[in-house]
Amino acid sequence: MIVVKNLRYKYPKGKDYVVNGISFEIREGEIFGFLGPSGAGKSTTQKILIKLLPGFAGEIAYQGRALSSYTDEFYQDIGVSFEMPISFSKLTALENLQFFQRLYRRTVDLEPLLKRVGLWDERHKKAGEYSKGMKIRLNFVRALLNDPKFLFLDEPTNGVDPANARIMKDMILEFKQRGGTVFLTSHIMGDVDELCDRVAFIAEGRLREEGSPRDLKLKYGKRTVKVEYRENGELHTQLFPMEEIKTPPFFRLLQEKEIETLHSGETTLEEIFIKVTGVKLRD
Ligand SMILES: Nc1ncnc2c1ncn2[C@@H]1O[C@H](COP(=O)(O)OP(=O)(O)O)[C@@H](O)[C@H]1O
Ligand SMILES: [Mg+2]
């Protein structure tokens, strides 16, 4: 769907490349997670991919055609939510959406979308009077109102309460089930783990690692099984290489001891994040 080759970008006034030679591919119908610490170049990359920042080096192709060969028609097919939600603060939420609806040939019914994100009853309130979480949800609805084929979501659930984040994540998954493709940036690893088919980790403008969450967890995890058991009231831990779980010592332990926990040693995306980017997560 999208193929990016050796992408480099420097802001007109900046002196360093903030995106420094990254290559990746987003396949049709997948949720592709673009992860990395603050300042890594995620939002910049998203802006380049949606044709907002010209003057990049490298190649970007959509469905086999160079991004630069697309006219503004391109915007009919994509939905975008930016890191900072933007809306006309003096218009109501509904008026905001109606304004954007006029820019598109194809639009969807707003009522079910607004109801879903819990904003229907407050649709006549001015967007400027919305809370941060409400603004984010309003922007999310705007990203969906042209029935896009492709969604670009920059930290979509950041600043949203858990119940609403759950609803948004379900909507993202449903979008994918209908055949949509998603580019998602985030540093909330739980969300990423749940949503993304494949992820790429970037740091300092470079791609550090790429793969499905499952494959990465296997790659970075230890192939071990940890058994915790209690004996004479005391807790003991024993570690087995995965290859040994079919051998008598492992069976004996399971049969003879009072097992409390049993864990295989996959790592978490959060640990991988720290390992490959060298940066600790804030949340
Ligand atoms: N408009 C801009 N002009 C100059 N530098 C910018 C601009 N926007 C972002 N940057 C710089 O580019 C780098 C990458 O930023 P960004 O893409 O926003 O990172 P991320 O989204 O991963 O946190 C940062 O060092 C940031 O300061
Ligand atoms: Mg960003």
Image (spheres, grey):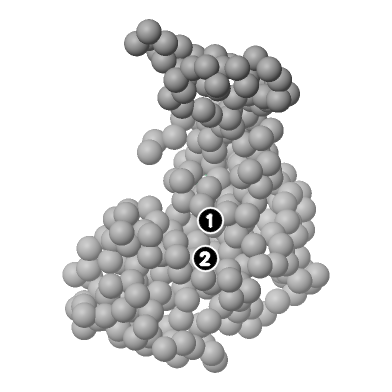
* Quarter of image, res 69: bottom right
Q: Left or right: where does residue 120 sit relative to residue 215? A: left
- In the image, residue 113 sits, relative to residue 277, either above or below, namely below
Given residues 133 and 10, the one toward you in this image is 133
Mark 2 residue crowding within 10 angstroms, few (<14) / some (14–19) / many (20+): some
Reading the image, the residue beneath label 2 is 173
* Marker count (numbered): 2
Mark 1 residue crowding within 10 angstroms, few (<14) / some (14–19) / many (20+): many
* Quarter of image, res 233: top left
Q: Is residue 81 visible?
A: no
Q: Left or right: where does residue 48 sit relative to residue 90? A: right
Residue at position x 45%, y 90% from top?
102
- In the image, residue 133 sits, relative to residue 282, either above or below, namely below
Q: x%, y% of residue 241?
A: 67, 20
Residue at position x 43%, y 24% from top?
260
Three-letter amino acid code at the position of disc 2: Leu
Q: Earlier in the sequence, mark 2 or mark 1?
A: 2
The reply to whether discs 2 and 1 touch (Cβ–Cβ < 8 Å) is: yes
Tag of residue 195: 1
Given residues 89 and 216, the one toward you in this image is 216
Q: x%, y% of residue 165?
A: 36, 59
Q: x%, y% of residue 122?
A: 21, 78
Could you tell me how far apart the alpha carbons at marks 2 and 1 are, in whole angstroms? 7 Å
Three-letter amino acid code at the position of disc 1: Leu
Tag of residue 283: none
